[in-house]
């Protein structure tokens, strides 16, 4: 557990750096009210209560402090440290009133003040217990532990906690904090770009730890492998609402008869472990536990050759997942060599690029012929907009096309758009506009998911435009119109019939 001064140091360190892909942030403490840190009603005693009785109450209630109240007003407080230092160490008679060892007129904080103010108060005055007031009424107590529990939702803390776990049960408990991490990042208004990197880093850590535990239980792998993230995790764009897309590239010395049983069980354990941690099994079974997606490098070469040379609809669907690959654990060169070959094969390959362009035009923004928002009609999501499939995915598909046409190995959507501008596939202004549209749509999605999780609902991608202000709806419409404009430009370059 962090000390309060360590927590303060961490906060100030992160607050003075510009958020980025590897930045950790505790800025949610600024927007988190003290009210949310209160975990129970206050435990109070009269100032005349004997010390021994106060000690019994603290033991029974399992608390480290108690408030002294007289006629409804806060009088003082005592802590377990006071009992140790002022009673036991001093040999004080425990029948004396608790008033004799109390801190009188302690510093307090208002219930609606930011948690950051409480952190400052504790750090500056080296105190660990602060009574909370609603007006003049005592409503609770917060401690340094409450503050550091908030810190436990940070990416650095979570990653460290993940690697300390020795069982799947432990990983499941730690992974439950990912939703709180995303909510904290949303409260701190972290960019979608940074949030995607942070949440994906936690997914990487969980995956790596599951692989380590599986190796420890089953023995060393018989041949080298690379565990590869695909889809949104591969692009470093994951959110708390995500299934798993992954695969395994095995060394070409792999022999199915000799090694198949090991890797079937090995990958099943890891994929089932990810599912237990909240990254549900891919509905299309695009996972390393599926025989088709756990193959030697030479077989993966054959897959990509077929997909690129014969880009049929199923092949394009598969490339949409597996062209967004990123190494997570194992032997990196197995996937790095493969990706280099794939990128070289797609660059300038007009036949493939025509079909890839067609794939990028398939998902349309939800606009009517007049360019106005056109929500879903009928069904469970009536009146809503699918921010992911009709907003974010079209931009992701455009960026994938631009990057592969330019022969670039980058997989993150924002970075692909930057590469596209550098290579002249689109103008710098168009790239900036698309990046802004992507950031806006992803930000709306993250805020929407955070609100649903705060309300106790599962995160989803369906936003009701009526929940937005006129200003926000205007920006949403502008973002969709921009995507449609870029899709039309690409359609003119590669008309698909």
Image (spheres, rainbow, N blue to C red):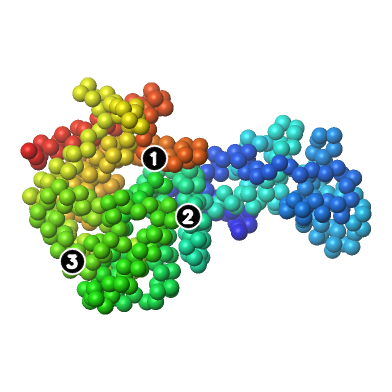
Mark nearer the N terminus (2 vs 1)? 2
Which element type, helix, strand or loop, lies under badge 1? loop
Q: Which is nearer the eye, 313 or 364?
A: 313
**Which residue is drawn at the image coordinates 81% and 57% (left, top)?**
83
**Which residue is drawn at the image coordinates 87% and 44% (left, top)?**
47
Q: Position of residue 356 (x, y in %)?
A: 15, 47
Left or right of 304 in this view: 329:
right
Label 1 neighbourhood size at 10 Å, few (<14), some (14-19), many (20+)?
Answer: some
Q: Position of residue 440 (x, y in %)?
A: 35, 36
Q: Which is nearer the eye, 52 or 265?
A: 265
| Residue 133, numbered circle | none
Mark nearer the N terminus (3 vs 2)? 2
Residues at marks 1 and 3, CA–CA distance in whole angstroms:
36 Å
Report the residue marked by disc 2: 175
Mark nearer the N terminus (1 vs 3)? 3
Q: Position of residue 435 (x, y in %)?
A: 29, 40
Report the residue marked by disc 1: 460
Query: What is the quadrant of the C terminus in the image?
Result: top left
How many numbered circles are shown? Answer: 3
Q: Which is nearer the eye, 149 or 362?
A: 362
Res 327 seen here: no
Answer above or below: position of 315 versus 183: below
Left or right of 353 in this view: 117:
right
Report the residue marked by disc 3: 299
Which element type, helix, strand or loop, lies under badge 2? helix
Query: What is the quadrant of the N terminus in the image?
Result: bottom right
């Amino acid at each position: 557990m962090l000390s309060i001064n360590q927590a303060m140091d961490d906060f100030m360190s992160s607050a003075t750096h510009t958020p980025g892909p590897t930045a950790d942030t505790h800025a949610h403490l600024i927007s988190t009210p003290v009210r949310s840190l209160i975990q129970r009603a206050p435990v109070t005693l009269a100032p005349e209560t004997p010390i021994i009785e106060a000690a019994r109450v603290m033991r029974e209630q399992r608390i480290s402090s108690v408030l002294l109240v007289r006629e409804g007003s806060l009088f003082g407080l005592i802590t377990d440290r006071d009992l140790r230092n002022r009673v036991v160490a001093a040999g004080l008679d425990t029948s004396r009133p608790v008033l004799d060892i109390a801190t009188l007129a302690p510093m307090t904080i208002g219930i609606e003040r930011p948690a950051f103010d409480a952190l400052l108060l504790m750090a500056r005055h080296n105190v660990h217990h602060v009574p909370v007031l609603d007006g003049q009424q005592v409503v609770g107590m917060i401690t340094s532990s409450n503050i550091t529990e908030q810190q436990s939702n940070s990416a650095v803390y979570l990653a460290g906690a993940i690697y300390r776990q020795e069982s799947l049960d432990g990983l499941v408990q730690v992974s439950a904090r990912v939703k709180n991490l995303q909510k904290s990042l949303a409260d701190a208004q972290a960019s979608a770009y940074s949030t995607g990197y942070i949440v994906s880093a936690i997914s990487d850590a969980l995956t790596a730890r599951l692989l380590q535990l599986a190796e420890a239980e089953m023995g060393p792998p018989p041949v080298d492998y690379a565990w590869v993230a695909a889809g949104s995790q591969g692009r470093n764009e994951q959110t708390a609402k995500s299934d798993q897309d992954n695969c395994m590239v095995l060394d070409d010395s792999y022999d199915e008869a000799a090694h198949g049983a090991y890797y079937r069980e090995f990958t099943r354990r890891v994929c089932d472990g990810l599912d237990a941690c909240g990254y549900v099994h891919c509905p299309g079974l695009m996972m390393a536990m599926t025989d088709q997606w756990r193959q030697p490098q030479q077989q993966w070469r054959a897959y990509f050759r077929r997909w690129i040379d014969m880009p049929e609809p199923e092949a394009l669907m598969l490339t949409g997942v597996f062209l967004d690959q990123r190494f997570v654990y194992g032997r990196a060169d197995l996937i790095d060599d493969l990706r280099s070959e794939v990128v070289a094969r797609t660059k300038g390959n007009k036949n493939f690029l025509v079909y890839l362009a067609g794939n990028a035009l398939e998902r349309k923004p939800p606009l009517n012929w007049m360019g106005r928002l056109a929500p879903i009609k009928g069904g469970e999501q009536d009146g809503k907009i699918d921010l992911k499939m009709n907003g974010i995915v079209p931009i992701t598909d455009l960026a994938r096309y631009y990057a592969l046409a330019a022969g670039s190995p980058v997989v993150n959507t924002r970075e692909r758009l930057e590469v596209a501008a550098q290579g002249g596939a689109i103008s710098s202004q168009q790239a900036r506009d698309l990046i802004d549209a992507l950031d806006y749509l992803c930000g709306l999605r993250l805020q929407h998911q955070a609100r649903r999780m705060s309300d106790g609902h599962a995160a989803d991608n369906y936003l009701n435009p009526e929940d937005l202000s006129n200003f926000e709806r205007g920006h949403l419409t502008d973002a969709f119109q921009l995507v449609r404009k870029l899709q039309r430009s690409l359609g003119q370059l590669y008309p698909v019939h």
